[in-house]
Amino acid sequence: MYLSKVLIKGAACRNPYEIHKELWKLFSYDADADRDFLFRIEHAEHNAAEILMQSCRQPEQSYPTVRVLACKEYSFSLQRDQQLRFLLVANPVKTIKDENGRINAKGGPKSCRVPLVREEERHAWIARKFQGAAILETLFIDPVFPLRFRKDKEERTGKIQPVSFKGTLKVKEPMILHELIKKGIGPGKAFGCGLLSLARK
């Protein structure tokens, strides 16, 4: 996998959904390709945003609005019982049924995602996500500024409430943890959530 530092300039940096579209430009076009990158907004100003991006493919192209500042290939050598520091900006939510009894396209009850706001709920959520992969030893939970997005084609606006999880963990099953790193954790990946960063203690 590759870890890149990316700079995005212009109006796109003010809309997380547009940042996602800009990052797609860094890879060769493939109509059948699924998104194989995760990202996190490290720093943002009015007309510029610095992005940390993890990708399965090496970014190949740059444009005036999106530019790769640095890129390195890296691999994991996780060991059982290894202790590591971690950082994750994620979108912890739960799914509830529509209170008005509306029906979805498949004829079942419509449901929606709502953010988890109590710390004990967020703690339980992240513990479930790491279940089987690692044991949380220390955990600090901090709110992050809400991310407001706009999908122009659908004329739809929305907001997600990311949360920063950081602390230390002990590796339980290296292969399962590796898959979490590769695939990301939780919903909202198109808006900069889900990238798990690990470092030695």
Image (spheres, grey):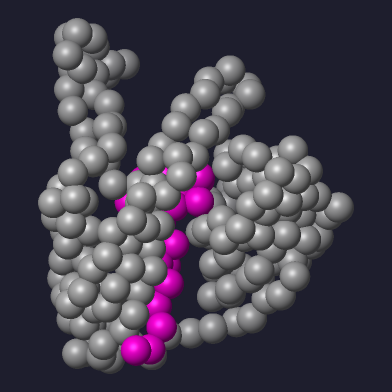
Image position of 55 (left or right of 112): right
- Image quadrant in which you'd find residue 42: bottom right
Q: Establish if 93 lies above or below 78.
A: above
**Above or below, 49 relative to 170:** above
Asked whether the viewer can see residue 67, the reply is yes
Q: Could you tell me which quadrant the N terminus lies in?
A: bottom right
Q: Residue at x 24, y 78 (%)?
A: 169
Point out residue 72 in the picture as x, y percentages from the top left corner. 64, 81
Quarter residue 97 falls in:
top left
Q: Does the magenta-highlighted stretch encompass residue 199?
A: yes
Q: Is residue 162 above or below residue 138?
A: above
- Nearer-the-camera pick, 110 or 163: 163
Estimate the x, y position of residue 8 in percent, counting from the top left: 73, 53
Question: Which residue corresponds to the image point at 38% horizontal and 69% vertical from the top-left?
Answer: 87
Direction from residue 92 to residue 6 in the image, left or right: right
Magenta residues span 181-201
> Quick check: 118 left or right of 155?
left
Give the residue at the far right of this rendering.
Answer: 64
Q: Nearer the viewer, residue 57 or 147?
A: 147
